[in-house]
Image: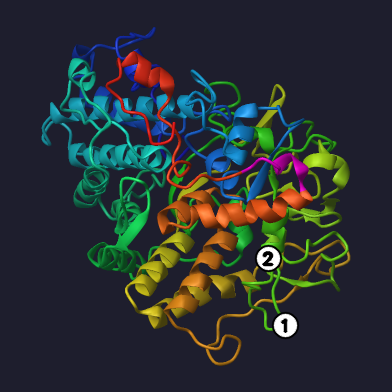
Amino acid sequence: MKHHSIKIILFTAILFSFGCKKYLDYQPKGYLSQSDLSSPTAVDGLATAAYAGIANDWWDAPITSMWEYGSIRGGDAYKGGGDIGDQQQMDKYEQFYLVNSSNNGAGDFGFPGTWIRAFSAISRCNTALRALNNLTDAQFPKRTTRIGEMRFLRGHMFFLLKVLFRNIPWFDESLTNDEILKVSNTMSNDSLWIKIEDDFRAAVADLPTTQPGEPGRANQFSAKAYLAKALLYHAYTQDDNYNVIGIDANKLQEVVTLTNDLINSGNYALNSDFAFNFLDGHDNSPESVFAIQYSINDGTAIGGRLSMSTSLNYFAGAPQYGCCAFHVPSQELVNAFSTDANGIPKFDTYNNVALTDADLTTNGVTVDPRIDHTIGIQGHPFKYNAAVPYDHSWERLAGVYGGFGTMKELQLATCGCFKKLGPFYGSSVNMDIIRYDDVLLMNAEAQIQLGNPAAALPLINQIRTRAANSTGLVKKLDGTFPSNYKIDVYKPGVNVAVWDQATALKALQWERRLEFAMESPRFFDLVRWGIAAETLNTFFATEKTRHPFLSSAHFTKNQHEYFPIPQEQITFTNGLYIQNKGY
């Protein structure tokens, strides 16, 4: 973990307890028995190892960035790469032909690998909790705080598994490995959410409001934010076929209360420029509520504790890179940044015309400034460096996926945060799990669904005001803007006819898409709102006319909202795990 945050103790770094049932009896090299872990120092090391566990991934089976599972499946991006078959499991995710097989990406690869890595991280949390429970506060004064941290991290990993697979086994530190082998994945949807929420509630109770000098550790406010997030998802009540059949007002009211606590705390604020969320030198900013910490050349591993989940996404033809051009912004996403004469999104007509290089110029169509923070466009500064303009020659398979490039998760090759590892690339820039902009929009969404759209208006307008002011770092060498920026806040009766619940909800959903474009939330938002099928099939209907490789793409309602349970897990448990619907 990053210096001044959490230092990994060597012997705990090699401790590894696999959470996948297939590996419960595996004793890795360097394993430490429970009797070796009775000292406060050793137990504290276990807690540190749990932090490392939530970031132990690679692009092949991520548990940090969800771009493969959220951006590609949500219509923000195309898979990209060298051809349709390059990392074919992603093509299956993108086109939703996970119909006849539940093992699309097997073993440690694809979503089955994500299952294993996530449960491995949960196992680390449970191992630390068992050891912490065997100490007293007198022996280890930070015991209660560390327990809160482990509950927070465990809740985080179970949340990730819940939104990916829905029907998952849940267990805590009280169970032995033999008992875990008897746990099925048939707990009710409501009960699973309550278990996850309980972890965050416990974290809120146990954690201090700040952890001075250690920004990588969870605190009470990050736990409140994550509890609010879990409650917001849980509030959209689903039946057994994944249909949203109601919205729980009590849960929404708690979301408002929790997020108000952060808003009123004075501890958090939007960065003055949207760019700072994606640039080296701005880690643990006032906008960062909880982030995975990374480092470079710190003496650990190969090159340090680098972020590698997005390492496939650097460009193939760019002289400073060389591989692999995945995660390509979709034409529909590009079009979504267009604005009308009043600087308001073109909600109903944005996708009527496919914007091209010629449209996206200083004198072209009007657009939201966030387009140049999110998407690489021909001739526009790449990653805030006017001397490095994006060029189509960087695209690997231009005839299929070409036109635009991703940007948020990438770093310039000249950055001290950047490192090449074989054919892949990593960086030491933190990955935010929850930012303050998300907190504002969670509050706004809950207010709207509670029938208080007026309370949401200033929150959404805060986000839009920051977007309007985020143009200083995107200028070209001659000092001009690369695009024709026009964005305004919502002014009922001026640039929007009314600000009723329907209008506010549409604006909220749009704002979430543009603010977090290419960061992965899109698919999961669509599912919890209950509009995934209609939204994505409408997306495919138009995109098929632009990109023939999507000709067979189709989202099947009451099936594709969630991944199948990995078949190897069902086989290993002799059918104890029940497969998800449609698979």
Instruction: Give the residue displayed 36% in from the left and 71% down from the top.
Output: 449
Would residue 328 be seen by someone viewing this image from the given angle? yes
Classify mark 2: residues with Cα within 10 Å, few (<14), some (14-19) or many (20+). many
Dot 2 falls on a residue whose secondary structure is loop
Q: Position of residue 269 (x, y in %)?
A: 46, 66
Q: Which mark is residue 337?
A: 2
* Front residue of this view, candidates 461 and 294: 461
The residue sitting at 29% across, 41% down in the picture is 149
Q: In this rendering, does residue 428 appear at all? A: no
User: Where is 114 relative to 513, above or below?
Assistant: above
Pointer 1: residues within 10 angstroms few (<14), some, or many (20+)? few
Question: Residue 187's x, y, as percent?
Answer: 23, 37
Rendered view: 4 above or below 181: below
Image quadrant where residue 245 sits? bottom left
The count of marks equals 2
Q: Quadrant of the C terminus?
A: top left
Mark carried by residue 341: 1
Which range of residues does the magenta coloring cover? 547-553
457 left or right, relative to 295? left
Inspect the image, locate mark 1, and give the three-letter code of the amino acid beneath it: Ala
Front in this rendered view, residue 69 or 316? 69
Q: Give the CA distance from mark 2 to mark 1.
A: 13 Å
Q: In terms of secondary structure, where does tag 1 sit?
A: loop
Closer to the camera in the image, 335 or 559: 559
Based on the picture, tell me whether residue 82 belongs to the magenta stretch: no
Inspect the image, locate mark 2, and give the three-letter code of the amino acid beneath it: Phe
